[in-house]
Image: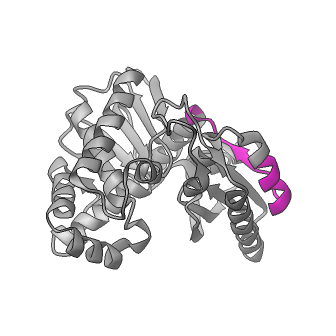
Amino acid sequence: MGRYAVIDVGSNTVRLCAYDVPKKKSVRGGKPRKIIDVKESIGLSAFVEPPAGGFSTDGSRLGTMTQAGIDAAAKAVKRQVKRAQVVCADQVWVFATAALRNCTNSAMAVAALEEEAGAAVEVLSGEEEARLGLLGARLAFPLEEGVLIDVGGGSTEVTRLFADGSVAGESIPMGSLSSYRQFVDCVIPTKAEIKRIGASFRLALDEARLPVHGESELFGMGGSVRAAARVWGDLCNGGVRSNVLLPAHVDEIIASCQDEPGPFAHGLLRVCAQRVHTLVPGCAIIREVFRATGAQRMTINKCGVREGYLLDRISRL
């Protein structure tokens, strides 16, 4: 049994997960057993200064990561590395996703972060993030055909799974936090702001030209998807949660936000306070995925890119 730690520098959080892993270097050798899961919310995407003319959903106009953002990430990574050492991890890996990938000074920001944190940081490309997300998702249950989405803070990975085992994927630089920052003026989005988020994501997905229409099997992972299911269960379904999200569930969350923003915000503070500003932007993205695919349900997967990254790196040892 080996013990390994993964630190995920995301757009919303810097998250540490440590696992006990069977010695066999394959998924068939047994599933990793998570022993610690600690996240620090720093909202790294909020430290990105927008470019002239504003951000773009196609990635043609990127912002610049500020020194304050680098400092916040470095301090969080340092703390997470210490926690990994406390649990005696044999190896600690640090990777970053959209917030550090989608900025004009990515290389400089990563170098400065590494120097301040005292740890090497690997920035995943959108394609690699989607590949590792699929690898991790398959730990929970077999995924053979359909569409897999991972709605993160700074990007959304959309992967089409074909019956012959091939895949086609795209990383769209719109996530729950980046959409909030780009489109929302206050805390809870207005009806017009929700529409703008949906329209912008729909355009980006159309431009990606992924063959996703008509797919009945839809799988979701990532914090925004899990939070949406949790919020619907706790606020709209009498506290009964489910691992399945329906289009009607997402519509009900958005309708509650629009009809009673005050009570809705107070409810979010009880259920998931850290996502009070990003939950609805994430739901607007999820709703567009439902519309694009025509799927009538989304099965929620609790594993994802961290588990995929873990398995991939262990296989290289």
What colour scheme does the image use? one colour
| 291 sits to left or right of 134 | left
Task: Residue 77: name its quadrant.
Answer: bottom right
Q: Position of residue 273 (x, y in %)?
A: 40, 74
Q: Position of residue 67 (x, y in %)?
A: 73, 57
Q: Of residues 55 and 84, which is closer to you in this image?
A: 55
Q: Is residue 262 magenta?
A: no
Q: Of residues 182 and 281, which is closer to you in this image?
A: 182
Q: Of residues 283 and 186, which is closer to you in this image?
A: 186
- The residue drawn where x is 38% and y is 39% is 148
Q: Of residues 260 and 150, which is closer to you in this image?
A: 260
Is residue 289 depicted above or below 245 in this figure? above
Q: Residue furthest front?
A: 52
Is residue 125 depicted above or below 77 in this figure? above
Q: Is residue 224 visible?
A: yes
Q: Total label count?
A: 0
Name the image quarter holding the C terminus: top right
Q: Is residue 113 magenta?
A: yes
- The residue drawn where x is 75% and y is 77% is 86
Name the image quarter holding the N terminus: bottom right
| 154 sits to left or right of 158 | right
- The residue drawn where x is 34% and y is 52% is 281
Q: Is residue 240 visible?
A: no
Q: Position of residue 88 (x, y in %)?
A: 77, 72
- The residue drawn where x is 53% and y is 32% is 59
Range of residues picked out in magenta: 110-127
Q: Position of residue 256 (x, y in %)?
A: 17, 63
